Amino acid sequence: MLKHKAIENIVSVKWLHNNLQDENLIIFDATISKVVDDISALSKIKIPGAQFFDIKKKFSNTEAPFPNTIPSVKQFEENIQALGVNSNSVIVIYDKHGIYSSARAWWLLKTFGFNNVAVLDGGLPEWNAKGFITEAIKTYNKVEKGNFKVKYNLNNFVAFSSLSAISKDNDFKIIDARSSDRFQCIVAEPRKGLKSGTIPSSINLPFSKVLNGNRLKPKAELKIIFNALAKENQHLVFSCGSGITASILALAATIVGYKNSVYDGSWTEYASLTIA
């Protein structure tokens, strides 16, 4: 059993390597394709024992009009139990880009009440850089159904209906994770037909600014970044294109102690509902 009963929100590849054989450990590969490019050839390999956390099909509401919409409690619970998650499991999530969609999976687990979860710092690229063993992706092993029961955390989630009030409330700060060129409407949105623009009163912190290459910046550096943008007692609301990279900022803000939420629909929903 893991010596660390409770893990931090981010763990190193060395930590994962040292605990790889623990019976309570569950590893998820939460890779999705980026909007602007494809997954590299690394998609043919995985960390030993990893299961696939399917954000697009299993852990999003596929009937919703906008991409990556948060699933229902029932859908989440059924699919997370099918992956063998128990109440005493320890989960580490990675992706094949470094830190990208793994943060979304982390946010989903936290939102549905599973707290003993961490993102793998640097993901599969960092795992490979250290020379740790991988295995081919052929089929994922069947696992025994888990017993985890959802406890929905409303504070993690912001809906479109709340944005108007939030944008006028000094206790909140809306921060957009898109690139500065997208935020400033210098370049078009990558999704075909989606208008450019920004949520009223929002400010910009491109998600790349909290990363050093594949890894998250040290806590001290993250604290400086967030302190320059918001007061410590403000509740941060993160947005992006469709809720993926906003979750990277949520991870970073959680590590430095800011209360925060993700606007799940993000710019895709906001632009669709407000711009004629």
Image (cartoon, helix red, strand yellow):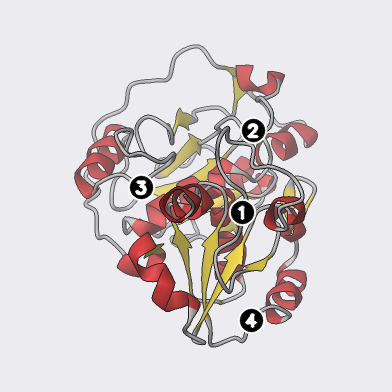
Q: CA distance from mark 4 to mark 3?
A: 27 Å
Name the amino acid, label 1: Val
Comes first in the chain, label 3 or label 2: 3
Q: Position of residue 229 (x, y in %)?
A: 69, 78
Which residue is farthest front? 276
Q: Nearer the viewer, mark 3 or mark 1?
A: 3
Residue for badge 4: 230
Residue type for callout 3: Ile
The residues bearing labels 2 and 4 have C-alpha atoms spaced at a distance of 31 Å
Front residue (pair 142, 213): 213
Task: Decide which of tag 4 and tag 3 comes sooner along the chain.
Answer: 3
Q: Element type at marker 3?
A: loop
Looking at the rendered structure, the secondary structure element under dot 1 is: strand
Going from the N terminus, do you reach mark 2 or mark 4 first?
2
Q: CA gap, disc 2 to disc 1? A: 16 Å
Q: Residue at x 59, y 50 (%)?
A: 245
Who comes first in sequence, dot 3 or dot 1? 1
- Report the residue marked by disc 1: 11
Which residue is denoted by mark 2 in the rendering?
Answer: 96
Element assignment for label 2: loop
